[in-house]
Image: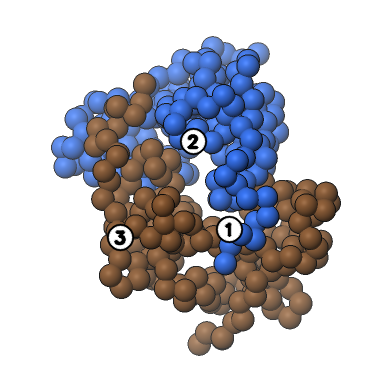
Chain colours: A brown, B blue
Amino acid sequence: MMENYEVTRLLVNYKTLEEFKNFREFGAAELSMKGDLEANIIENDSESPFYGIYYGKKLVARMSLYRIDGKFDRYFEPAQDYLELWKLEVLEPYRYKGYGKALVNFAKSFNLPVKTNARQGSSEFWNHLGFEPVTYQPTRDRGESPYVWYPDGVHEQHADTEPVNIESTNF
Amino acid sequence: MMENYEVTRLLVNYKTLEEFKNFREFGAAELSMKGDLEANIIENDSESPFYGIYYGKKLVARMSLYRIDGKFDRYFEPAQDYLELWKLEVLEPYRYKGYGKALVNFAKSFNLPVKTNARQGSSEFWNHLGFEPVTYQPTRDRGESPYVWYPDGVHEQHADTEPVNIESTNF
């Protein structure tokens, strides 16, 4: 049985950055946060785009969640604001205990469409949580494997600008 | 000393798809190619967005390369057509022999700016090939670690639409 994990909005501070070092996906987003903090561009303890779950005092799961403006929506019909979810990761010893599911359910709780880029081998996880793959559009998806969750009344957006023949987008 | 590897534009056919199964990154792009081929949407042996290097008859390295229209350019100044490179991968036993470098040099040979999303731990590889990280912009880069290569006279595009304070893009 799954526990009722508490999802917390993470703060931008050196403690959070230290916790992030335990996660495999550590890249430009984290380095940028560090730089902004050091240069006082971002205030210490301001809210970050990251959400996480603590086990005791240890951050064991996290994700980044952004609200994308409907005018940039190329995934949903009708076009609307949606949530983009990335960097979903659970630390190795804490996997398969429902932490990932708790984070994704938190994202779904806003009742906005959710889009993510499924990592290699994760399709079963996303399917299980009600996500579906979209029709791949090369210039939009650029090698990603987008999975989406539709709230009631929302459907896949049909391509209107994407050429059917990929040749024309190549050289 | 590095050999002079021949970079080949890959064809869309069942042989190419069979070769792709050897690569770790097998996702929506490949499944879409398979579906299009099966449904006769794409002609057998038409050109794909993939380029690769064969060792004998075996495909040992590949990448996907797209020309992105300058009107979508949010990375380069002046804004212009650029190449987006992804799915760069060399099969395990063939690594560290210059195959990856040969593919990247092929991309650079068009003398257009090149943008890629650096995978975890690959920054040394990209730096070595003259690529640089860009200033991270959360809503543009969405968790990616973009690395770019600038031809002469091209610079980083400054953010004009991206808020400095990430708070305003969140909720």
Q: Determine the residue positioned at 29% across, 39% down.
A: A161
Of the residues under marks 2 and 1, which one precedes in the sequence?
Answer: 2
Question: How much space separates mark 2 and mark 3, taking CA atoms?
Answer: 30 Å
Question: Which residue corresponds to mark 3?
Answer: A78
Q: Determine the residue positioned at 38% across, 60% down.
A: A80
What amino acid is labelled 3 in the image?
A: Pro
Classify residue A151 as left or right of residue A100.
left
What amino acid is labelled 1 in the image?
A: Thr
Label 2 residue SS:
strand
Q: Residues within 10 Å of mark 1 (few under 14, many from 20)?
A: some
Label 3 residue SS:
loop
Note whether A10 is above or below A115 in the view shown: below
Question: Which residue corresponds to mark 1?
Answer: B169
Q: Determine the residue positioned at 58% across, 62% down.
A: B170
The answer to whether marks 2 and 1 mark residues whose Cβ atoms lie closer than 8 Å is no
- Quick one: quadrant of the C terminus of chain A? top left
Compare residues B15 and A136 and report the one nearer the observer: A136
Label 1 residue SS:
helix
Question: How much space separates mark 3 and mark 1, taking CA atoms?
Answer: 21 Å
Q: Residue B86 shows which numbered tag?
A: 2
In the rendered structure, the residue with mark 3 lies on which chain? A
Compare residues A23 and B16 and report the one nearer the observer: A23
